[in-house]
Amino acid sequence: MSKRLQIYYNAVFGGMGGLLGWWTIGSLGAERWNIWLASVVIGAGIGAGIGALVAAMEGTMIKRAVRRALADALKGAGAGALGGLLGLMLGQIGFLALGGGFIGRPLGWMLLGLLVGIGEYSVSRKLRRASYGALGGLVGGFIGGLVYEGLTQLFINQSDEVQSWVGGFGLVLMGACIGALIAFTRHALSRGELRVLNGQREGTIREITDATTLGSYDGCDVYLPDSAVARQHAVVRRNHD
């Protein structure tokens, strides 16, 4: 899978995560709860949805390994839930402290994006890869948060139903921003890449940020499901920073 497709699918899965979080929270009716309890539940739900789907993208679309995708999704959901919980609480505090406006809540969504990106470490165990993801998530959370808050303010005088649909659309865009920027930043800051030239995974590109493993085990960075390839076949390391 090319770099562009990886960024595209990361955006799609991030958007789907935002939609999943919006649907789940809407089913609970949390928006009618106490503002702080609602912030905790809504933030955790949205963060878990985005974190799970972004983390599951590689296992689903690149490795095409269901077990790996589910395992990664669970790890990503945990990091995303923590990021969403803390982020929305921080955003609410900032929003009240600043008396509204466009700054307070986007700062909270930045924290969500940051922790979704850091959640990459629980999946890959690669420190540099996680740091690149964290940077991308931070920027994506801020951009997505600005768009989300802008839509909220634009339709603030509309009916509750309209505001609900607008909020859902805003969360899809925010999830897409976080997902896309995480993948884009990893590719932009990497020092090299590996390309699969033939076989079942022909065309797959993997950026090199830390030591990169290759093998027929779906936990390897480059998954090569071929009986002629050892479970852990090789490791490619960076010699210079």
Image (cartoon, grey):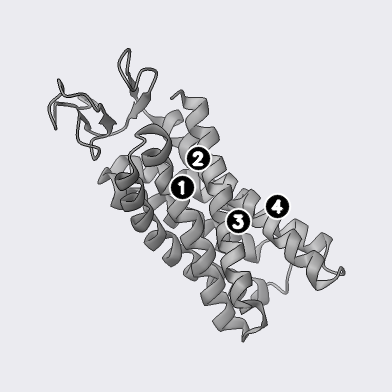
Q: Label 4 amino acid?
A: Val
Q: CA distance from mark 4 to mark 2?
A: 19 Å
Q: Work out which residue is located at the far bottom of the displayed protein and give it.
A: 34
Taking the image as shown, residue 104 lies to the left or right of residue 197, namely right
Q: Earlier in the sequence, mark 1 or mark 3?
A: 3
Crowd rating for badge 1 (residues with CA inside 10 Å; few <14, some 14–19, many 20+)? many
> Which residue corresponds to the image point at 79% horizontal and 63% vertical from the top-left?
153
Q: Earlier in the sequence, mark 2 or mark 3?
A: 2
The residue labelled by disc 2 is: 10
Front disc: 4 or 2 = 2
The residue labelled by disc 3 is: 19
Q: Earlier in the sequence, mark 1 or mark 2?
A: 2
Above or below for 82 versus 137: below
Q: CA distance from mark 3 to mark 4?
A: 15 Å
The residue labelled by disc 4 is: 147
Instruction: Look at the numbered discs 2 and 3 and tell me whether their residues touch, using CB distance below 8 Å.
Output: no
Quarter of image, res 212: top left
Front disc: 4 or 1 = 1
Query: Looking at the image, can residue 134 be seen?
Result: no
Q: Label 2 amino acid?
A: Asn
Q: Work out which residue is located at the far top of the displayed protein and give it.
A: 197
> Which residue corresponds to the image point at 30% horizontal and 45% vertical from the top-left?
68
The residue labelled by disc 1 is: 54
Q: Label 1 amino acid?
A: Val
Q: Quadrant of the C terminus?
A: top left
Query: Looking at the image, can residue 214 be seen?
Result: yes
